[in-house]
Amino acid sequence: MSHIKNFLELNAAKMYQEKVNQSRCRAPRLVVTIAMLLGAGSSSNLAALDAINVSYPSPAPFYIPVAVAIHQGFFRDQNLDVKLIVTRAEVDRAALISGDIDFTLRIGSTILSAARGLPVRTVFLTTLKPFWSLVVRPEVNSVAELKGKVIGSGGIAGSHYGTTKVILRKHGLDPDKEVTLKFVGPGERIPAVLSKSIDGVLMDYGEALRARKMGLKLLLNAADHYSLASAGVGVSQKNMRERPELTKRFLRAQLQGLRFMREQRDRTVNAMASFLKTDKEIADGVYQLSVNNFTKDGMLDDASLKPLVDDQLAGINPKEAPLAQMFDFNLLQQILKESR
């Protein structure tokens, strides 16, 4: 009996040891499996955002929806890390086509480039109003008095340049013969007028409000005189063709920023104050002046768009170009359908 008992106890011990060994073997595998799952989760959470370069002239009220989208994390939600790069209008054409920048917020120069046959398109219209006031020296009382004077301009192409020329024409002055246009970059315009190196220049609303506090005169608001495709999103056809999802992700965030801006005044003013590097009083004043200048959803029908573009390109583009050569809203239309 003792032999049987010893045999049974020995077998029981072996069986127990085998179970312990199996458990020990399973435990590391379980740990490895959990570690792999945690690793996969962390790599997903820590995955590098897609860095994209976006060009624009300078922080200005035109670009409030982008500022809001950055401030509220809408681009990050689309896995995008947006880097805003200040450029001149003449640089954008080559940079957009070469891929050195992914998107531009300059629409005047994008429309002009496309009209002249370059492979770029406007895919989103942010606003159809110029956000500038004509700021002059205090002794100037009318646009006509600027005859023979020096007027500041944002370059030899783009919205600022085009708007300046249109305003001068509408007030009876030939911008090519009766005034001298001088390049003055953002941030240099108030000092240039104060120092009398120029007699007047279009300034964005925030800059114009600061100029008025310094004794200069706001002669007129450009938005009261005509419409203009002043801000939006431009992209190369190559980028649209090869990376359409990237463009759609950018446009989704842009659209979110546009809608948020209309609905959330206080939070938008906070974003504006940071973006424009100004106090909340100025930011709130700019918001009140500009909130109704923006499009509803980034689009405009052809019947409304054509006269606006014709006016914008008058005297700049030597030949008429069809709208399809300048605008492509197909990706934006897809996004709008998805959100319904």
Image (cartoon, rainbow, N blue to C red):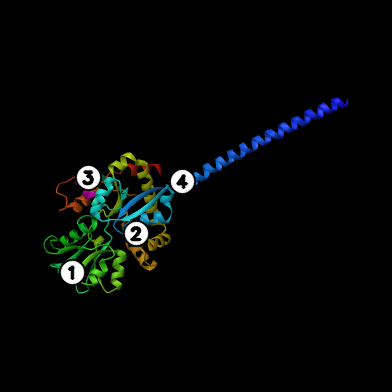
Residue kind at label 1, given as amino acid type: Ser
Comparing labels 3 and 1, the label whose residue is closer to the camera: 3
Residue 156 in picture, x, y percent from top left: 19, 56
The answer to whether residue 340 is visible is no
Is residue 111 a member of the stretch shown in magenta?
yes
Residues at marks 3 and 1 touching, judged by CB atoms closer than 8 Å:
no
Comparing labels 4 and 3, the label whose residue is closer to the camera: 4
Is 141 in front, or is 54? 54
Residue kind at label 2, given as amino acid type: Val
Q: What element carries label 3?
A: loop
For mark 2, what is the residue? 291
Which span of residues is magenta-colored?
A: 110-116
Identify which residue is drawn at 44% across, 49% down.
77
Q: What separation in Å lies between label 3 and label 1 (alpha carbons)?
A: 39 Å
Comparing labels 4 and 1, the label whose residue is closer to the camera: 4
Residue kind at label 3, given as amino acid type: Leu
For mark 3, what is the residue? 118
Determine the image quadrant of residue 244: top left
For mark 1, what is the residue? 142
Identify which residue is drawn at 59% across, 39% down.
32
